[in-house]
Amino acid sequence: MSLLLKEVQVVDGTGKAPYKADVLIQKNIISAIGNLKSRGAARVIDGLGDYLTPGFIDLNTNSDHYLSLFTDPAQSDLTSQGVTTIFGGQCGSSLAPLIYGTLESIRKWIDPYEINVNWHTTAEFLKSLERVPLGINFGTLVGHSTIRRALVGDAKRRLTESELNVFKRLLRESLNQGAFGFSTGLGYVHGSAASNREIEELVKVVKEFDGVYATHLRHQGEKILDSVKEAIEIAERTGVRTIISHFRPEKGFSEQFEKAVEKIEATQAEIYFDVYPLPYSIETIYTLLPEWVRVGSLEMMLERVKNGGVTPLIKKDWPNFKGDEIEIVGAPNHEYLVGKSLARVAERLEVDPAEALIQVMKMTELRATILKRDIDLKVLPRALASSRAFIASNGNAVLPPGFVKPKESLSVFPKFLEIVLQSKLMTIESAVAKLTTEAIKFISPKRSLGRGVIKEGMAADLALVGKNNYSIKKVILGGELVDEVTANGQILRRR
């Protein structure tokens, strides 16, 4: 089908100022840009002076962690925001490679047996995903915990040289088969056991392939500066392109966060961070436990939580928190808890918020997901506009039963545009470049992947953005209007 977009303001993703033009799409390619009033097309859309941008690139999603790539392949909660390309395998957990064919590394998010697994290698996974009618483009990183857990189980120890060599071989194979890089979840149990040497040895392999390294920091909040220093030193020593995942200014630690941003901006290393313009963090409930409790498997941690002699020590280690700032957004098999604040649960149980949290942990066997309204919104705009920042949803498409999605998560990218443009922190062309061309150049500097810029011959992945309120009017994926037909996304591979 041919499609003509008339009278749009083209923001092409390169940083060039908007210009008025018509854009013709034939099949899945941008075939012409200019004054095309005399040209015909099977479908004509009058842009009414709205912005036409490349489809947005989301560098950090959880659509693989929640298996919604398979259970909700349309991914409409992301495409409705103008996103046409996403990258998974974040925070140390990916859907491949699987040494034993199991998805244990994602069970902190969802039951890993929700789908049948018919792959082991990254190549087999990507080929299997090509048989899914995926409504978005998808690429993946290799998860550190996915491989580490298969090698050593729940043991919190250093890898032997033999194990490290096996790890390197598996990582090389996955990068050869199309993975774009490597991720760690150093704040999670299985990632926290890794030494700096282990991470550096693996990141050196990533550098050989000109891949990227994404890291979920060991600590946010009070220890954020130490964690950022660790990430910077690894980037400086290895030379690998690095991105810190879901970097955010938590209330009470804004000064440390601002200093961390300054450190990132001051280094010559290629280190960036992704951030989202939302007032909350979403975490698995066990991450709220003190560090000394977060050792071993979920079952081992749960035994400590259930221990009547240990729970007073756990509660003593918790800082004072407000129950109305924590909401339960996921509680498999306990749906009646979903959408309730911890304060409301405490009121129902007639206990204090700390004891209510312990009870929820027990009831859900540490598998609940919580939302914390803990972001300092006064500090956030400066981070969004940083030259080292990328915007990412850290989200996914429709969640499975037993979960609820905050409505703010459905407007991450329009909200970013609204904040930085209304506050005049960025121009429309620089903001769109951050969401498109710059993101593609970070993930694949030597190859554009055929998208991320409006140019003749490029893939027709586009978003029509309202000129007044930055809402998403239309999204085009591979030349098709995603709200009118079943668009087919591509499985992307690093070459």
Image (spheres, rainbow, N blue to C red):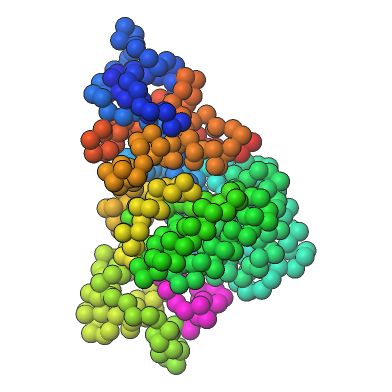
Percent x, y of residue 235: 62, 55
Q: Which residue is depicted at the point 34% across and 8% down?
A: 39
Which residue in the rendered view is the most extreme toward the top?
38
Percent x, y of residue 332: 37, 65
Viewer-closest of 131 and 384: 384
Q: From the viewer's perspective, is residue 317 above or below residue 170?
A: below
Q: From the viewer's perspective, is residue 443 above or below residue 203?
A: above
The image quadrant where one finds the N terminus is top left
Percent x, y of residue 174: 65, 47
Which residue in the rendered view is the most extreme toward the bottom?
309
Q: Examine the structure image and report whether residue 290 is included in the region drawn in magenta.
A: yes
**In this view of the protein, can residue 354 be seen by the observer?**
yes
Quadrant housing residue 233:
bottom right
Q: From the viewer's perspective, is residue 206 above or below residue 74?
A: below
Q: Which residue is depicted at the point 36% across and 56% down?
A: 380
Percent x, y of residue 230: 59, 64
The reply, left or right, for residue 2 in relation to residue 259 is left
Viewer-closest of 331 and 492: 492
- Segment tinted magenta in the rendering: 284-304
Viewer-closest of 178 and 242: 242
Q: Which residue is depicted at the point 38% across and 34% down?
A: 429
Q: Which residue is depicted at the point 35% across and 59% down?
A: 379
**In this view of the protein, can residue 94 be seen by the observer?**
no
